[in-house]
Amino acid sequence: MNPFEQRPINMEDGFMDWATIYPKPYDKKSVDPYTKTRVILMNGIEAEAIVFKHQFHRNCQDNDLRRELALSRRIEQQQQKRVNWLKPIDESVLETTIGYEHLATDLTAWLAMNEPDPYVKQTLDLALLEDFDHLYRYANLLDLDEQIPAEQLVKKYVDIIPGRPTIAEHRHPFDSVRRPVNFKTADIQTMLNSLIIVSGEQQTMNFYMNLGPYYYNDLGRQLYQEIAMIEEQHVAHYGSLLDPNCTWLENLVLHEYMECYLYYSFYQDEVDPNVKPIWEMHYEQEVTHLHKAAELLAKYENKQWQQVIPGGKFPKLLQFQDTRDYVRKVLGEQILLSANRENYVPIQNLPEDHEYFFYQGKVNHDLNTVSSHVVIESHQKQYNTDYRYESNPHPVEGLKNRLVDNTEIARIPEIEAVVM
């Protein structure tokens, strides 16, 4: 499929009335977990489109161009509201959070499995194990506070076990900066993967930092606060992959192309009869936005869209699938991996005076204040075990013990990992 070869509709025909914008929500008890992950991701994609166009607007002096941005941005706003309001009234913030971390796990794993650039793949793998651990921490909080087993929400599509422990993820800001990708020479899949993961992680950061304070007890508020800080690291981690040499209008074309790619991908796989037509309609709207972006690129920069996206044909479509084997493989191989500026090294290879240990000493000097640890410890005290769903034994020996939360692995250099 090549969206540049499709006939666009009239831009203003994309405006929707209130009845259309307010959709029938999915049923949280029967919804397919991948419908939820698609909804969550497209909400993040639309939020990124809106924020990007506002930033473009603020850095643009041409009011005719700003009016074009305002027009398509208004439709993006309507799309975002329509997608985000698919969430039902009776789904709690914590239940939704399980969907966010399920998305982060399976999306990151799929992108890594289909990433042709080794450096970008490693960047995905590093954060994959961290979001995977967040799913485990939130699942324990859900079972502790609401007595809801998270496996009922993810329908056993994904394992719920420790990843790289959240306490070990807190790194100095210097180590969240990566080497940018050259979008002029990169594979289109790499460009899409980079744009998609930044949008998804940015949405998670915003969700936690804004809704975390509304949780109804201190431990939950503290867990959202801690993990929101990791999500900020991830936004920097992935955001630094984006090519800073792309112009605003080149980025506009890339954003619209990404939206077309995702809506088309999700239309192919959607099983919910109420959601599938939304993906189809939004795809048609985004084709129009893409054609307008290409027109603006030609008008203002005298460039053709082929200079930004050679060929225009979609690469392999994004498809949510069972990634448990891949996650377990990465977990077994990379549990001890950390970052050293732009590079990735095992924790035991960091020098003793590295910023990682300084930062850890600042934020994690008292284990009793580290909520990601306390929530597991609280569950273990109340139920004599942590909460897990695992299809097979944990691949890392040091993370098998369900009676003790391991706060040293991947954080203390002397602690080695024994892999099954």
Image: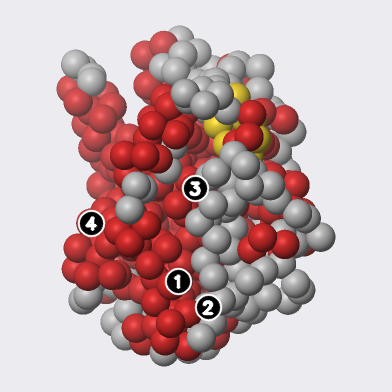
Check whether the beta carbons of the residues at disc 1 and disc 2 lie within 8 A of each other: yes
Left or right of residue 68, residue 86 in this image = right
Position above or below: 314 against 133: above
Query: Which is more N-terminal, label 2 or label 4?
Result: 4
Q: Residues within 10 Å of mark 4 (few under 14, many from 20)?
A: few
Foreground residue among 292 and 274: 274
x and y, in percent, of residue 182 in the image = 59, 17
Foreground residue among 131 and 256: 131
Q: Point out the image quarter for the C terminus.
A: bottom right
Amino acid type of the residue that numbered disc 4 sits on in the rendered structure = Asn
The alpha-carbon separation of the residues under discs 2 and 3 comes to 19 Å
Q: Residues within 10 Å of mark 3 (few under 14, many from 20)?
A: many
The alpha-carbon separation of the residues under discs 1 and 2 comes to 6 Å
Query: Which is more N-terminal, label 1 or label 4?
Result: 4
Q: Point out the image quarter for the N terminus.
A: top right
Comparing labels 4 and 3, the label whose residue is closer to the camera = 3
From this viewpoint, is residue 238 visible? yes
- Which quarter of the figure has residue 239? top left
| Residue matched to label 1 | 376
Comparing labels 4 and 1, the label whose residue is closer to the camera = 1
Q: Which mark is residue 168?
A: 3
Left or right of residue 322, residue 135 in this image = left
Foreground residue among 328 and 262: 328
Amino acid type of the residue that numbered disc 3 sits on in the rendered structure = Ala
x and y, in percent, of residue 34 in the image = 58, 69
